[in-house]
Amino acid sequence: MAESLPEHDRILQEIESTDTACVGPTLRSVYDDQPNAHQKFMEKLDACIRNHDREIEKMCNFHHQGFVDAITELLKVRADAEKLKVQVTDTNRRLQDAGKEVITQTEEIIRCRVQQRNITTVVEKLQLCLPVLEMYSKLKEQMSVKRYYSALKTMEQLENLYLPRVSQYRFCQIMMENLPKLREEIKEISMSDLKDFLESIRKHSDRIGETAMKQAQQQKTFSTALQKQNNVNYGRNMHLGRNRILESKNEITLKRTFEDEDEHEEEVLTAQDLVDFSPVYRCLHIYSVLGDGEIFENYYRKQRRKQARLVLQPQSSMHETVEGYRRYFSQIVGFFVVEDHILHVTQGLVTRTYTDELWNMALSKIIAVLRTHSSYCSDPDLVLELKNLIVVFADTLQGYGFPVNRLFDLLFEIRDQYNETLLKKWSGLFRDIFEADNYSPIPVANEEEYRIVISKFPFQDPELDKQSFPKKLPMSQSVPQIYMQVKEFIYASLKFSESLHRSSTEIDDMLRKSTNLLLTRTLSSCLQNLIKKPHIGLTELVQIIINTTHLEQACKYLEDFISNITNISQLTVHTARLYGLSTFKDARHAAEGEIYTKLNQKIDEFIQIADYDWTMSESDGRASGYLMDLINFLRSTFQVFTHLPHNNNDHAAMSGKVAQTACMSACQHLSMSLMQMLLDSELKQISMGAIQQFNLDVIQCELFASSEPVPGFQGDTLQLAFIDLRQLLDLFMVWDWSTYLADYGQGTSKYLRVNPSTALTLLEKMKDSSKKNNIFAQFRKNDRDKQKLIETVVKQLRSLVNGMSQHT
């Protein structure tokens, strides 16, 4: 108990000295003590309170008088305080009235200071914004005057330098949003300009190409004239007289060339003069700046490829006129001249690889087009114009660095076609010459006419030169004309061979090959057709033989002519030879064969008008009229052969051979025709009188053969043509059957050429005739014996015939 009291005192001390917020733990210790400690604490607390009350009361009693004194003093100060309050209030009112103007001025000063600060801020911000606005204004001005590349540079400066400084302002955001739109607008505008440019060069390609080809041709003409001028001195020593003319011509040509160069010097235009390339440069720069250079390059190349395909597509009627080809070539040259210009003035837009690829594609198409369309050309002049255009076309593009070897290879194909058209043209010329020829020797009345003829044809005949005028040249008018046309053909063929960048040897070889084709195919065919024409008679055929002989002799002059124009000696190992010799020999052989054929046809015509009375009792005592006419015709015909050329021994032998062969062929055909007449199956009976008449005709044939209508036959060679008829007729005229039958099969037989079947056929015809006409009436006493003899001979002949068939 005693222990708890000090504890309560301690607690009360803590409560008095401790902050009320921390009294909780102290009070809790009261309840943690022994039971009834709470009651005891309360009692202790009450006692402590009473002690404090007594101390308070004592203190109040001690200080009460001082309090009363203080109140009394305060009441005394109250009146002074009221008076002081009134004074302070009045002073404050007067002070407020006096400070109103100061406050107003101060507020004005503050406002001005704020405005000044704002103005300074605005000026600073405007100094940042003004360059942006100026650049944007400059951008708008550049856009309006279409300076798009400068505009893009201005945009780049705005984005990278100016706008970041004032990016916090709204107008800058608007500008930033507009810049991509402006870029797209520039791209669209530049692309539109590019499309206009592409359309423009498509329209102007032909003019660009025409100008480029014209310049290339002028340059080539100028170079050729200079080369000819340089060659004059060399040629003067070889052919002085001829080259004086060439020299003057070359000087005139060179002078004209210089004059033309002077005239066109101021008119020389380039692709840049004809087309404004600025759109493509501008568009390339714009797309490069925008980072879309590759897109632009792909687009440009794609569009140009499309244009290339359009340019390379020819018109369907291009082959009809040279203007069609010229327009086609001009467009292609213009296209590639533009590409070459773009290649050299831009970097990367067009590369050499791209142009080479495009050219190879175009070249294949061009070759296919030319190969197709040139095949439609039937006019050699048009083919030659085409060749010249191809050469100028190739030279022009070669000058721009494009390979053109395949074009010159194509020219060799076209050259073959050109030769074909020339051959067709010259075939018509040859036909016209042959149709207009009168096939008679050329008459010359005086020296002038003679000189005119030999100026066209190299004819030499010392014997004819000795004769006085008027005289006749052995060939007809067609010979010099044919010779001149062959030379014209060589000139025409040479025109195509020029400018092909080939050596003189190759040109010489080409000329000789084409001339050989003319001689061996065209002229030979025309001669063969001429010989076969119905209206060509024997006289004309003889003249044709003469003509071919002189043309054959002139072949060596044609070879000299080719050598002179190509400056290639005939002694060169690789020099080809003309095949005219074989051509004219074949024509002569054909003409000779046609002579034989026409002679036989004429003989057949006479034979067809023969009108024998096969039942006559006796002959007329003279030969038949048709046969005498036939023999007269043959005599006059063979006299024509005396006109065959015989300027030398070879010609004389040739003419004699032709005449002999023709004469022998005619006699053999006449003999065969007469034999067929006797043995004709439609002829059923023949009288002895008819045999006698037939014998008189054969005698006339033999007389004709023995009269030597053509000189040169040995002995009775020509008469042997009628030996079969002679032995057959002798057998029947002499009635020598016993000798025939006895000697049959022996080499010494009198009737060796009489065939048993032939004799049997004729004997049966006579047998039938004897039964009807009783031709053996003068032998009436022996009539029966004669009939038995005929029957016996017939039986024996049949046995011979049967024996021959079995042996066969």
Image (cartoon, rainbow, N blue to C red):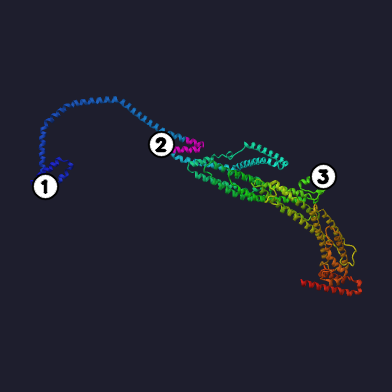
Give the residue at mark 2: 165
Is there any visible trace of residue 767 in the rendered image? no
Q: CA distance from mark 3 to mark 2?
A: 113 Å
Height in image: 78 above or below 266? above
Q: Earlier in the sequence, mark 3 or mark 1?
A: 1
Which mark identifies residue 732? none
Is there any visible trace of residue 638 in the rendered image? yes
Left or right: residue 411 compared with residue 102:
right
Q: CA distance from mark 3 to mark 1?
A: 190 Å
Give the residue at mark 3: 446
The answer to whether the residue labelled 2 contacts the one labelled 1, judged by CB atoms less than 8 Å apart, is: no
Q: Which residues are the magenta region?
A: 138-162
The answer to whether the residue labelled 3 contacts the one labelled 1, judged by CB atoms less than 8 Å apart, is: no
Q: CA distance from mark 2 to mark 1?
A: 84 Å
Q: Where does residue 90 sit, x and y in percent of width and height?
A: 25, 25
The answer to whether the residue labelled 3 contacts the one labelled 2, judged by CB atoms less than 8 Å apart, is: no
Q: Residue sitting at 91 percent across and 72 percent down?
A: 779
Give the residue at mark 1: 37
Height in image: 339 above or below 542? above
Q: Which quadrant of the structure image shows residue 767?
A: bottom right
Amino acid type at circle 3 is Asn
